[in-house]
Amino acid sequence: MIRFCSFLLMLAAPVAADIRGPIDVVDGDTLHVGPVTVRLHGIDAPEVNQPCEDANGQPWMCGAFVQSVIRELYQGQMADCEEVDRDRYGRSVAKCQVNGQDIGENIVLNGWAEAYRRYSMDYDLAEKSAQVRGVGLWAGTMQSPAAYRADRRGAAQQDTPSGDCIIKGNISGSRQIYHMPHNRDYANTRINAANGERWFCSEAEAQAAGWRAARN
């Protein structure tokens, strides 16, 4: 019985998939290792188009800068990775090393990414060290990459019409104004459902809901 149970446990245990190859950097936490796309386990770097603020409160494109830093550090180097999981995009989530050094730990320790505590506490102390020293992104302020992605997804969903419902119901102060595609400010008007704004399928529907037509 003991042997049988041990055999079942062996079958249930996940088998690590070893990945080895030259690195082609995609962004701050994603690499091509040979032919395999790898999302580095336990870290979360700013998105390439994500802005931050420096120590003086001035905006700068931190995501693109982090991408360039990681490329300078690792582009073309040989990596050895151990797969931990697969993400919803089918990418390998893995811990990778170059010359025996943990890539994820080095990135977090130098302040170019957060420890992704939602999935791992492996780099918690590395992030705290970077914060205390005020290095990398911690020299200024940065929105959590996860929060930045969520905001972008929400904005995209709120600004997408359903079918033929293309009239934009915008709220400005106490005014509820709807914009038709021919109106001057139509293209620049954004719909935020959380603020009560909405899409309408017809002018009659917008007027019945209390919105008035834009005057330009």
Image (cartoon, rainbow, N blue to C red):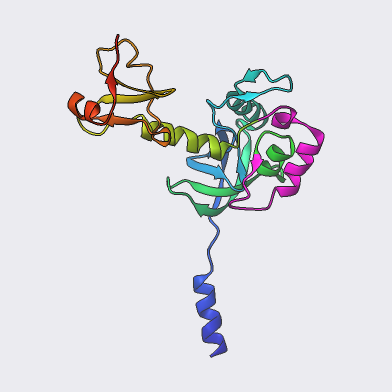
> Is residue 131 magenta-colored?
yes
Side (left or right) of 8 relative to 62:
left
Q: How many marks?
A: 0
> Is residue 66 magenta-colored?
no
| Front position in the image: 126 or 24 | 126
Q: Residue at x 62, y 28 (%)?
A: 71
Q: Residue at x 59, y 33 (%)?
A: 46
Q: Position of residue 203 (x, y in %)?
A: 20, 24
Q: Position of residue 5 (x, y in %)?
A: 53, 83
**Above/below status of 109 relative to 51:** below
Side (left or right) of 87 relative to 167:
right
Q: Quadrant of residue 112?
A: top right
- Which span is picked out in magenta? 114-141
Q: Quadrant of residue 70?
A: top right
Q: Residue furthest right?
A: 133
**Above/below status of 50 relative to 103:** above
Q: Residue at x 74, y 35 (%)?
A: 110
| Front position in the image: 94 or 175 | 175
Quadrant showing the C terminus = top left
The answer to whether residue 165 is visible is: no
Q: Position of residue 156 (x, y in %)?
A: 39, 31
